[in-house]
Amino acid sequence: MMADLYVKATPSADLNRNTEWFTYPGVWTTYIFIVFFSWLIVLSVFGCDPGTAWTIVNLAHFVWTGLQMTPSMYQSAY
């Protein structure tokens, strides 16, 4: 009876090769660990308060992802 409460859906086929790696096992866990350990590194190296360390990590993440975005990223790889 409890199993009837959940939606049974098949995952959609991701047709974009640039984003299909998001569905690999462990990707999101690894991403969270990288962000967290980046915060710890900034916190320990610069000796700033935790809020400032999160701001630095956030801005570094913004710059890094901004540099990675290119027009070809949104085009089909097929």
Image: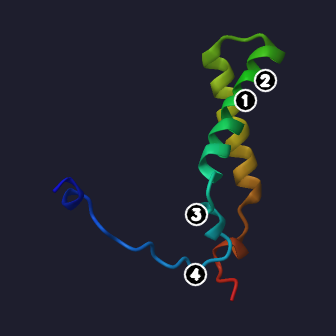
Kindly identify the amino acid type of the residue bearing the numbered disc 4.
Leu
Q: Toward which corner of the image does residue 70 lie, by quadrant? A: bottom right
Q: Amino acid at mark 2?
A: Ile
Q: Which mark is residue 7?
A: none
Q: Is residue 57 left or right of residue 47?
A: left
Seen from this angle, which residue lies furthest front? 1
Cβ atoms under marks 1 and 3 closer than 8 Å:
no
Residue 59: image x %, image y %? 68, 36
Q: CA distance from mark 2 to mark 1?
A: 6 Å
User: Residue 4's quadrant in the figure?
Assistant: bottom left
What's the amino acid at mark 3?
Thr
- Judge from the rendering whether residue 17 lies leftward or rightward of residue 64; answer left or right: left
Three-letter residue code for mark 1: Phe
Q: Earlier in the sequence, mark 4 or mark 1?
A: 4
Q: CA distance from mark 2 to mark 4?
A: 37 Å
Which of marks 2 and 3 precedes in the sequence?
3
Q: Residues within 10 Å of mark 1 (few under 14, many from 20)?
A: few
Q: Nearer the viewer, mark 3 or mark 2?
A: 3
Residue at screen point 70% across, 52% down: 65
Distance from disc 3 to disc 4, alpha carbons, whole Å, reads: 12 Å
Residue visible at 60% across and 49% down?
Answer: 28
**Residue at which label 1 appears:** 37
Q: Which residue is mark 4?
A: 15
Residue 23's disc number: 3
Q: Which residue is mark 2?
A: 41
Q: Earlier in the sequence, mark 2 or mark 4?
A: 4
Q: Determine the secondary structure under disc 4.
A: loop
Disc 4: CA contacts within 10 A as few (<14), some (14-19) or many (>=20): few
Q: Do tag 2 and tag 1 residues touch (Cβ < 8 Å)?
A: yes
Q: Residue at x 62, y 70 (%)?
A: 20
What residue is drawn where x is 72% and y is 76%? 72
User: The N terminus is located in which quarter?
Assistant: bottom left
